[in-house]
Image (cartoon, grey):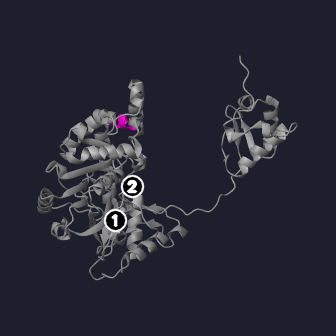
Amino acid sequence: MAARPSGLGTDFLQLRPETAPAKGLTDWLVGALRSAIGDGRLSGGALLPPTRALADDLDVSRGVVVEAYRRLAEEGLVSARTSHGTVVTAAVRPGPCRADPPQRSGPGRFLPELPGARDHRIDLDLAPGTPDLSAFPRAAWLRAERAVLNQVSPSALAYGDPRGSIELRTQLAGWLGRVRGVRAHPEDILIVGGVAQAVALLSHVLRGRGVTRFAVEDPGSRGAREGLTYSGMTPVPVPVDADGLRVDALTATGERTVLVTPAHQFPTGVVLAPDRRGALLDWARQGGLIIEDDYDAEYRYDRAPVPALQSAAPEHVAHTGSISKTMAPGMRIGWLIAPRELQNELVLAKYANDLGSPVLPQLVLADLLGSGELDRHIRVTRLRYRARRDAFTQTLRRAWPAARVHGVAAGLHVLIDFPESCPKLDDVALATRLAEAGVLTHPLSWHRVRPGPPGLLVGYAANSPDRLREAARRIADLLRP
């Protein structure tokens, strides 16, 4: 066996023994490891290399490494565990202070923090937009992943079509046609990293065509507005009422692109009324583009399904959705079905952005769609979410009969507004008081551009019925006159 070239060192902590004193290899190695533990490069629980492997990498005798590990163990910095190896046991020195991330909102974006909320223990997190992550179908996903790995060809793991795997796009074309009425062929579908990336890609392409302003719902997702602003667009607010987006107000703005959530409007929970749907589609056919975020479309309880807008005008609607609410937002799998005149530019933008979405999760999702597992999962969680909604709303109405709850027919959250005798309530102050009582909600004003009535957004999907009943009682105790 050829001798290993000396002086190469090791990837582990980039150790190079030629920097050690001629007769102080052990002291040098102990000092290097102690320093790495102290500054956090080796955190508590980190596994050190086997003594023989590290000695070979450093081209030193194994006794040097054994002695170094022994000294560190005597100092209480590492410990040897049977069948596991040597691990770091010391606490990491705190690093520089960093700001905590802001709170997240539905649909899955950053929001400001309630004043003083960080100082209180939140034991009932009712932030909207989060599904029951404990319900993620782990067993089904694992079975599908094993099947995929047993069957996938090596070539499928190379750089592929930036539109996404043909297997997933084929399954989505059929599934979206069945459950949402979407009219699309596999070649029309672009797999994206969630709705956020879909809107960002559309913004990029439309900005290249001279579009600099998007009409948006008001109230509407604050995160979506901030995403548009980051992409170089100016959001133009359009009022939403009990029937959804006011198309007359949209027409009055003169804008030709609008972002809407027609199946379950965020945050009010209303469904775009039939006459408004017709008016909006007429507006699009006269030269407008609708970006349809199919938010919460899968979860409905007390109303008939409504088809996607795209089904009525595919050349005037860019339809986008994801599995963020049906499975988990951290999966980052979504789709975009745009009018064909935009598709080539969107594929180029996707390719330039990230070369394409990860292929293995796409193949697993395709398997779940083809086997019917995703449909079964949605049916199970729909029943679960309905029971949780009922637990919260029924308890709240008993404890506070004057409370008005909206958006209960579908989705994963409800909107609480207040009696007309309380028009000047500060919903940020109310949400802060609730946070002090351990209940996290979101004030409606966070999602407004123009002034409007106050309200509180309450997500119910991620908590058990008993916890939701407790949350409803705390809300009623604090907010009722």
Residue ID for mark 1:
395
Foreground disc of the pair 1, 2: 2
Q: Which amino acid type is marked by label 1? A: Thr
| Residue 362 forms part of the magenta stretch | yes
Q: Main secondary structure of the magenta part?
A: helix
Question: Which secondary structure, mark 2?
Answer: loop
- Tally the marks: 2
Residue ID for mark 2:
130
Magenta residues?
361-365
Considering the image in quadrants, where does the N terminus appear?
top right
Considering the image in quadrants, where does the C terminus appear?
bottom left
Position in image of residue 200 (x %, y %): 34, 54
Badge 2 crowding class, 10 Å Cα cut-off, few under 14, some 14 to 19, many 20 or more, is many
Q: Residue at x 42, y 25 (%)?
A: 154
Vertical side of 2 occupied by 226: above or below: below
Q: Is residue 58 left or right of residue 11?
A: right
